[in-house]
Image: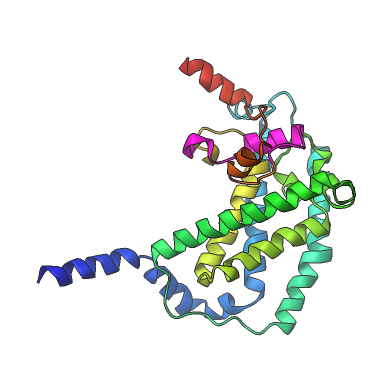
Amino acid sequence: MAFPKLQEHSYLGQNRLVPIWDYLHNNYEGTLRSPLFPVLLSVSTYLLLVALFTVLDVLAPHWPSINRYKIHPEKPVTWTHIWRTLGLTTYNHLIYIFPAAVGQWIWRPPIPLPKEAPTLTEFLLGILGCTILFDFQYYLWHLLHHKIGWLYRTFHAIHHQYNEPFSLVTQYLSAWELFSVGFWTTVDPLLLQCHCLTTWGFMLFNIWISTDDHCGYDFPWSLHNLVPFGLWGGSVKHDAHHQKPNTNFAPFFSHWDWLAGTGSNLAQSAAMRKRESKGA
């Protein structure tokens, strides 16, 4: 009699996403099946994140409690920086993202939704797998666009107009780079045969960590300070890439730069040095 109870407990523990999926499936099926949904989800999430970080950027010069966590506290983000990066972001979305989304809405049929939810393990491992795959793809893409002069000048140089990145620099990109990132974000869950709920989770996670990479802050609760052994790059290492563009090519993890010898010794912020000095 004990074995069925144990099996039932395991089943419930592995299917904690069932109530969430059933609720979404039963109440928002039409919205979730629309080809526009992933685009709206991605764009709205990105705009929310950069809005939060931009508020911090505006307040930081006047609030030492915020400015102390900036990687470059002596270099405030100006309104000129904000309007310039926001202008290109808006242009890319209006000229490229919006027409592509409308095209999908017109020509692509509604997406069928699976009846069953993924298990929590499948959900988390799917997001991790997509992140690892994306990290490898972007590492190679990024490396090539720095090593081949024509690729750098034509497509990637615009992103390096800012040596001290802030959140709006995340999508301060050429159209080619924007589509490349969007392509891998879309294709990787298909390659790994992820549930659509896992796909959306990966999209949101990817947007969050990409924005965090460029945010210009080194908070104690930032992911790179929580993941042990320096396995996660984060904002400090990506800031070092903008200081020394031939280093730190991987967007998220650190292992490819370790293996290839492309890491940078600049990957330490003022906030990090303060924490280390207090611990000494």
162, above or below 181, in the image: above
Residue 216 shows up from this direction: no
Residue at image x 77%, y 68%?
98
Q: Percent position (x, y) of residue 169?
A: 75, 45
Q: Quadrant where the N terminus lies?
A: bottom left
Figure check: 106 above or below 259: below
At 63% from the left and 34% from the top, the residue drawn is 236
The x and y percentages for residue 56 are 64, 37
Q: Position of residue 112 (x, y in %)?
A: 55, 82
Residue 241 in the magenta stretch? The answer is yes
Image quadrant of residue 263? top right
For the image, the number of numbered tags is 0
- Relative depth, front residue between 280 and 200: 280
Q: Which residues are magenta?
A: 226-248
Residue 166 lies within the magenta run: no
Residue shown at 75% from the left, 36% from the top: 242
**118, 271: nearer the viewer:** 118
Q: Is residue 152 above or below residue 130?
A: above
